[in-house]
Image (cartoon, grey):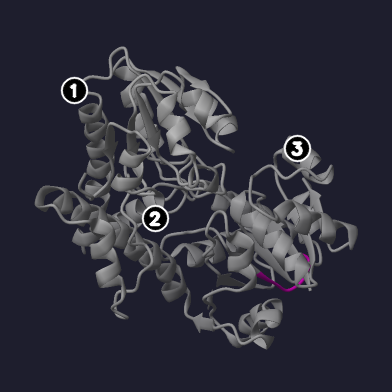
Amino acid sequence: MRIAMIGTGYVGLVSGVCFSDFGHDVVCVDKDARKIARLNQGEVPIYEPGLDQLMEKNVKAGRLSFTGDLAAAVDGAEAVFIAVGTPTRRGDGHADLTYVMAAAEEIAAALTGYAVVVTKSTVPVGTNRQVQQVIARANPQADFDVASNPEFLREGAAIEDFMKPDRVVVGVQNERAAEVMAEIYRPLYLRDFPILTTDLESAELIKYAANAFLAAKITFINEIAGLCERVGADVKEVARGIGFDGRIGNKFLHAGPGYGGSCFPKDTAALARIGQDHAFPLRITETVMRVNDEVKHRMVEKLRDACEGSFNGKTVAVLGVTFKPNTDDMREAPSLTIVPALVGGGARVRVVDPQGQAEGEALLPGVAWMEDPYEAAQNADLVVLLTEWNEFRALDLKKLARGMEVPRMADLRNIYSPKTAKRAGFRTYVAVGRGA
C-alpha cells in the first residue's frame, strides 16, 4: 500500500520505517528542511536502538523516502497518517492540537482519491471527528474516512513494540476504513497479534487510560517506597511480593525518582483536563500527577541529607539524566528537577550520560559534561545514579569510592544493594525505599 506519514518525530519516524519494513511504500513528510536533508543523507535525528539500520535497509529497497512536499506525498496515498506533536498547552493542561489541525487542512487540499486519514498522534477524545470536519470543510469533494490508531511505543524498545505489539488499536466509523487499516496491519494479523477495532472515541481514550494507569502504578510504588523508608521495609521485596499476584503483575513496580518522558506527564495532564471539561474530575489521575511532582522533590531532599544538609561547595557526579535508558529524550526527566536544585544550592555538578548531552546542554546549564563516570566521581562528595543505563549497572564500585573526596552514593534506581555499596567502601549509601 502507499502510505504518507506526516511528521518525522519519534512516533512518525519509527512508524514510517516499520510500515516500510512491512512492505508498504512509505513517504515521510516534515516541514523541517534540515531534518529532511539529514534523513535523506541517512542520518537518524533521534536515538533509538536499531532504527538507523532498519531505515537504511528500507531506503535501499526503495520502500521508504523523505520529503518536505506534503502534496506530492499525499497524492495517490491510500492512507495518510498524522504523527505530529501534541504538546501540553501552556496554562490549561490541554493537548495542543494546532499541528494536528494544520496537517488536516493541508491533507484536505492534497487528497486526489479515496484515502483514510489516520491520527497516530496522541489526541483527546473527539479529535478525529474534528479532523473529519476540518477536511470536509476545506475540501467538500474529498473522498476520505478518518481513523484513530494510537501508538504504544516505549522509547528504547520502539521497533520491538511496533513489530511485536501487545495490541494494535484501530478506531473507525465504517467497514471501508476498517478494511484499509486491516490491510496496513496485515503482517501482524498473519502472526496473530491482537488487533482491536473499535469506535473512534474508544480508541482515543484507550491510549490515555493505558498511560494514566501505568503512571499510577509507578506513583503507587514510589509512595510505598517512602513508607518503606519510615518503617524499615525494603520496597524491592514489597514490589516482588505484590508483583507475583497475577492481578497486579510485576511491571512498572520499580521505585525511583518519579516518571518523566514524552508520554506520561503530557497524557496524564490531558486526561485530567478531559475529565474536567466533561464535568467528571478524574481524582486518581490528578493525585498521581501531584504525587509524582512530590516524589521528584523528595529526591532532592534525600540528596541534601546525604550531603549533610547543604549542597553548597560540594562536588556531585550525576550518572544519567535522560528520563530512561536507551533514549536521548530529556522531556520531563527527573533530572530537570534534581540537577537544577543541586546547581542552585551551590554544588559543582558533573554529568555523565551516553546520549543526553545533545539535548541536556541547553536544559541543564551550569554543569560539566563528562564521558567517564570514574573521572566524574574523582574527588566528588556524592555520586548520584539517576538513570539506569547499562553502563552504570556494573560499575567498579571500589574504584568509584576510592577516587572520591567523600565516598557517598545516592542510588535513585536501586541498582546496587546497601551491602554491596558498603563493602566497596561507600561511607554513605542512599537508595529509594530501602534501609541502610
Rendered image quadrant of residue 335: top left
Which residues lie in the magenta part? 112-116
The residue indicated by pointer 2 is 267
Give SS at disc 1: loop
The Cα atoms of the two marked residues, 3 and 2, are separated by: 29 Å
Residue most extreme to the left: 231
The x, y position of residue 102, in whole percent, is 59, 49
Left or right: residue 181 versus residue 393 is: right
Rendered image quadrant of residue 162: bottom right
- Of mark 3 and mark 2, the one earlier in the sequence is 3
The residue indicated by pointer 3 is 33
Q: Which is in the foreground here, disc 3 or disc 2?
A: 2
Looking at the rendered structure, the kind of residue marked 3 is Ala
Does residue 76 show up magenta in the picture? no
Q: Nearer the viewer, residue 298 or 125?
A: 298
Q: Is residue 280 above or below residue 230?
A: below
